[in-house]
């Protein structure tokens, strides 16, 4: 069965330092992968998506993610954290045939000044 | 601006009462989805619809019902059979399967 595991439930960084949010997936085929961000009491906003065109994907707000098939990983990074990046982040994969999404449990990012 | 509108933002339910959450989209998307979000559990799929007048159960459909009479509308009814309805409910839509889903700002449902 397909599954998505976000390895950290909480990550804390200082403003201006790099961000790394880790995600591993389990799938019997090559899924489409997404990262979404959710601010408190809001819906989810798409940061970036991987659909097999390129392994390094650039998204909005300076975020990027690299698809590594050998490691079944899709980690999200940003070179320099900003206070406005504090939010919850979800790694998401399509299930077989793409009808439904599988969500990770989420990683809460805290940015310290 | 195109988007998804969920209403109301906050909703309270009495014991034994059915309540309906509204979801409207003007993105001309074929597919629509309802999710339930509980702290620390990510999102779980309640129902989805790929086309008008058709919908399928998701992973946690018990105690919920939906309809899809119009392309732009996908209301969710939380029935009295749902014994633990307190949660944040999110509606989403996408052009087709495999496309990213666009989300509304959610409805927070609580028990009185």
Image (cartoon, coloured by chain):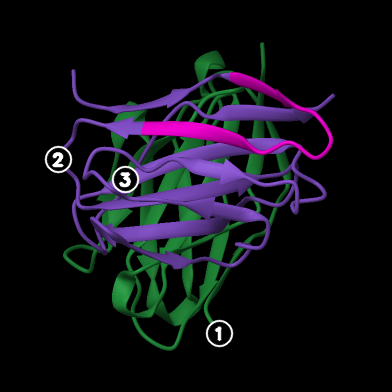
Chain colours: A green, B purple
Q: Which of marks 2 and 3 is nearer the N terminus?
A: 2
B32 displayed left or right of A28: left
Q: Which of A87 and B86 is in front in this view?
A: B86
Which residue position is annotated with label 2? B28
What chain letter is assigned to the residue under label 2?
B
User: Could you tell me which secondary element the residue under label 2 belongs to?
Assistant: loop
Report helix, strand or loop for mark 1: loop
- Bin the neighbour count of mark 1 within 10 Å (Cα to Cα): few under 14, some 14-19, many 20 and up: few
Above or below for B112 versus A18: above
Query: Which residue lies at the image location 49% right of the left edge and 67% below the top edge?
Result: A73
Residue farthest along the top direction in this orientation = A113
CA distance for labels 1 and 2: 32 Å
* Subunit that carries the residue with mark 1: A
Mark 3 element type:
strand
Q: Which residue is drawn at 22% across and 69% down?
A: A52
Mark in front: 1 vs 3: 3
**What is the chain letter for disc 3?**
B
- Residue B58 disc label: none
- The one nearer the camera, B108 or A104, is B108
Mark 1 = which residue?
A: A1
Residue B17 falls in image quadrant: top right
Q: Which mark identifies residue B93? A: 3
């Amino acid at each position: 069965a397909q599954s998505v595991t976000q390895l950290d439930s909480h990550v804390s960084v200082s403003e201006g330092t790099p961000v790394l949010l880790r995600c591993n997936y389990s799938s019997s085929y090559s899924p489409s992968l997404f990262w979404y961000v959710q601010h408190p009491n809001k819906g989810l906003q798409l940061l970036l998506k991987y659909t097999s065109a390129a392994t390094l994907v650039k998204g909005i707000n300076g975020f990027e993610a690299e698809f590594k098939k050998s490691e079944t990983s899709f980690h999200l990074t940003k070179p320099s954290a900003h206070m406005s990046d504090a939010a919850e982040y979800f790694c998401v994969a399509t299930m077989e045939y793409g009808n439904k999404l599988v969500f990770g449990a989420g990683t809460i990012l805290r940015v310290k000044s | 601006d195109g988007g998804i509108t969920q209403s109301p933002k906050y909703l309270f339910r009495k014991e034994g009462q059915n309540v309906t959450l509204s979801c409207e989209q003007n993105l001309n998307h074929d597919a629509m989805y309802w999710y339930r979000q509980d702290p620390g559990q990510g999102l779980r799929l309640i129902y989805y619809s790929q086309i008008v007048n058709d919908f399928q159960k998701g992973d946690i459909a018990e105690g919920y019902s939906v309809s899809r009479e119009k392309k732009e509308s996908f209301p969710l009814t939380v029935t009295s059979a749902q014994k633990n309805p307190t949660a944040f409910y999110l509606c989403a839509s996408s052009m087709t399967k495999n496309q990213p889903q666009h989300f509304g700002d959610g409805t927070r449902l609580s028990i009185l």
